[in-house]
Amino acid sequence: MNFQNKNVVVTGANGGMGQVITKRFLEEGAKVAALDLHVDEVEKWKNEYGDQLEVISANLTEEIEVREAVEKATEFLGPISILVNTLGIAQPATPIDEVEVADWDRLLAVNTTSLFLINKEVVKGMKEQRAGVITNVASIAAERPRPGLNAYVTSKGGALAFTKALAIELAEYKIRVNAINPGPSDTSMLGKFSPEGGDVDQVKEDTFKKSVPLGELVTPEDIAEAAMYLSSDGARMVTGSVLNVDGGRGL
């Protein structure tokens, strides 16, 4: 995979998956704009990658901040070639009759509305250049839900539907749009799916790891490999697809 001369935007770049994906693109020679609300970890890479990396702090659920962030990214990168959206939050397992409206709204804002806002802005430039690749990270939970993750599953199901809607809408502009469904992943986010007050480590081992037929949790590196493939020229005829990287969890 050759990403020399590719200009990449990664959202959620400070998270477990986002950091690995951002670094992979940098290692493959791409210029990267790393977007997140908190950017303390990726900010540390500036000395190593210099002019290859721009770090932008923004609340990606706010339209004005998203627009300004994309403007800054474009000033640094030039025309955006690739967008990878990893931004997401978890839901502690909660019965539907106990879910607060504010929590529901926040999950949809971060996991779904942010996709609409960032894609809306980035697509403008991709249309002009009649080229681009977008990958949205959703979740296998959207296809095989677990009890108590009602708002999370809804938000990720929306991400999948949005991905397919964009894929058919943007095909005439030669813009490809795909999604990745991670299975239970070995990141700090996984423990946040446990019920309030639950033993996080026990939930990881007994609930999530045992639900994966291949017997292991997915790693951020696994998701990065999928994102690199979907963003590469090797996937030039892949659009509207959902790639399950889940160790068989969706079966």
Image: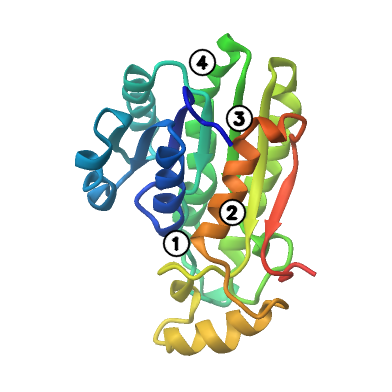
- 3D distance between C-alphas at marks 3 and 2: 22 Å
Residue linked to disc 4:
125
Amino acid type, label 1: Asp
- 3D distance between C-alphas at marks 3 and 4: 12 Å
Query: Which of pointers 3 and 4 indicates the residue nearer the eye?
Result: 3
- 3D distance between C-alphas at marks 4 and 1: 34 Å
Residue linked to disc 1:
103
Dot 4 or dot 1: first in sequence order is: 1
Question: Are the two marked residues, 3 and 4, in contact with CB atoms closer than 8 angstroms?
Answer: no
Q: Picture quarter containing residue 64?
A: top left
Q: Position of residue 246 (x, y in %)?
A: 67, 65
Query: Which of pointers 3 and 2 indicates the residue nearer the eye?
Result: 3
Dot 2 or dot 1: first in sequence order is: 1
Foreground residue among 108 and 213: 213
Dot 3 or dot 4: first in sequence order is: 4
On-image quarter of the N terminus: top right
Residue linked to disc 3:
133
Dot 2 or dot 4: first in sequence order is: 4
Question: Are the two marked residues, 2 and 1, in contact with CB atoms closer than 8 angstroms?
Answer: no
Dot 1 or dot 3: first in sequence order is: 1
Side of 5 where 168 appears, left or right: right
Q: Secondary structure at mark 4?
A: helix
Residue at far right of view: 251
Q: Secondary structure at mark 1?
A: helix
- 3D distance between C-alphas at marks 2 and 1: 12 Å
Side of 139 where 6 appears, left or right: left
